[in-house]
Image (spheres, rainbow, N blue to C red):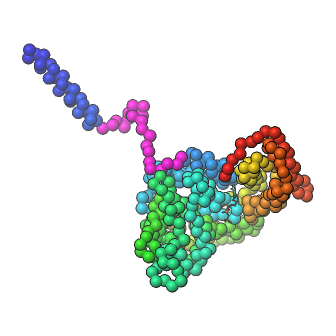
Amino acid sequence: MPFINDKLEYYAAERRRKEMEEKQRVPDVTDSPADQPIRKIQTRFRFDVEEVMKRLRNRILGQEHVLKSIENMLKIVRADIADPDKPLYIGLFLGPTGVGKTEIVRVLAEAIHGSRESFCRVDMNTLSLDHYAAALTGAPPGYVGSREGSTIFDKEKIEGSYSRPGILLFDEIEKASPQVIQTLLNVFDNGVMTIASGEETIDFRNTLIFMTSNLGAREIQSFADNKFSFLAKQAIHFLNPVNWKVKENETILDHLIKRRLESSFRPEFINRIDDIITFNWLTRQTLFEIIDLFTEQINRKLRRYGCELELDVSAKEFLLEKGYDRKYGARALKRAVRKYVMVPLAELLMEQTAPEGLVSYKARGSMTGIEIKVMYTEIDIQTETG
Ligand SMILES: Nc1ncnc2c1ncn2[C@@H]1O[C@H](COP(=O)(O)OP(=O)(O)OP(=O)(O)O)[C@@H](O)[C@H]1O
């Protein structure tokens, strides 16, 4: 039956041809996504950008533009497409004291590693002299008075793990000596640092590096204190054609801070920074909301003893009255909370013997201070640790 055999052969050849064609087919760029098989791309990182941002947005107030930059950075890191030969990120936080520059790093460490302390912090104030550069890289062998190969860097916290980035914070970067800055430049360029003993290296290629500085804070302050005379001076400056370099989308303040940076750091240092972000001052409204964060912090401790603290609006207004100082941001407010709430609360806690149930401390403000009243209820509350 040659006819049937021919047909079968023809069909088999046709099937093979179609299979081959299917294999060789270059995906048609016009195919709708619905026609393509769906797969979620997995990178090595195991943190959820949305979750991290939720926590940051709950805990850092009045700095939305900073959070937006952090979100963008986290997306790039999470997608694992950053330059593999450099640190994952290098950011410089500028602005006045007590506005959240360090707090943002603490909350980030908590969101990524589960602890507010899971980052390496280096206070540049302690490295202001050139010979202290040895504290970074470790003293070379035979160096008198120093422990060989011992560095102030915490390798574990800097390197992080395969699925989580390490975090490093340099505080008051403007105080670092030129030699220390040179050491950092090498780290920014190569992503690794060899300890002077030559036996160990620290890898920064899986690290988020943050630097803080108060540079320009005084200028911002005088800008706000004395807008008109400041603007007049700036106007005189800009009227001089030599100074007509400011870009269209650059505000006078940005320009001013940039100039301040340029007078303190070499251009090659500034050029290696991914983000330079100026933090806002905290407004009265933001500080009012931060009081709730402080209260929640106290409550996390109190709940362990079956107690809780509640501040009414009058107490918050009193705290704001005592603790609003733009120059010191939330630091002045924190001091007011300590003095007017935590001290009397601690005294009450020490004095009281409480019956079973929830002990609720209600704080009310007056012209002269805050009065804390104790209320008991029968309801037992869930106690938390931490
Ligand atoms: N924007 C903010 N949102 C919520 N809390 C804040 C904010 N800014 C400051 N705080 C609170 O104030 C405290 C001090 O802030 P932080 O340590 O971030 O200061 P800083 O900006 O780093 O200042 P400094 O330059 O003096 O170190 C923090 O522990 C935090 O509780």
Q: Residue furthest bottom?
A: 144
> What segment carries the magenta color?
26-48
* Residue 257 coordinates in the image, percent (x, y): 63, 66
Image quadrant in which you'd find residue 250: bottom right
Q: Which residue is at a point 41% across and 74% down the rendered structure image?
A: 198
Residue 153 screen position, x and y as percent: 53, 68
Q: Give the left or right position of residue 84, taking residue 23 as reference.
A: right
- Left or right: 97 in relation to 201: right
Is 36 included in the stretch rendered in magenta? yes
Residue at 42% across, 62% down? 85
Task: Give me the residue at 44% from left, 45% from top.
Answer: 42
Figure quadrant, ligand 1: bottom right
Instruction: Look at 56% across and 64% down and name the residue there.
Output: 120
Where is residue 235 drawn, in percent x and y?
A: 68, 67
Quick one: 178 or 379, which is closer to the camera? 379
| Residue 266 in view | no
Residue 345's place in the image compared with 28, above or below, is below
Outermost residue on the left side: it is 2
Residue 304 in picture, x, y percent from top left: 72, 49
**Left or right position of 134 against 383:** left
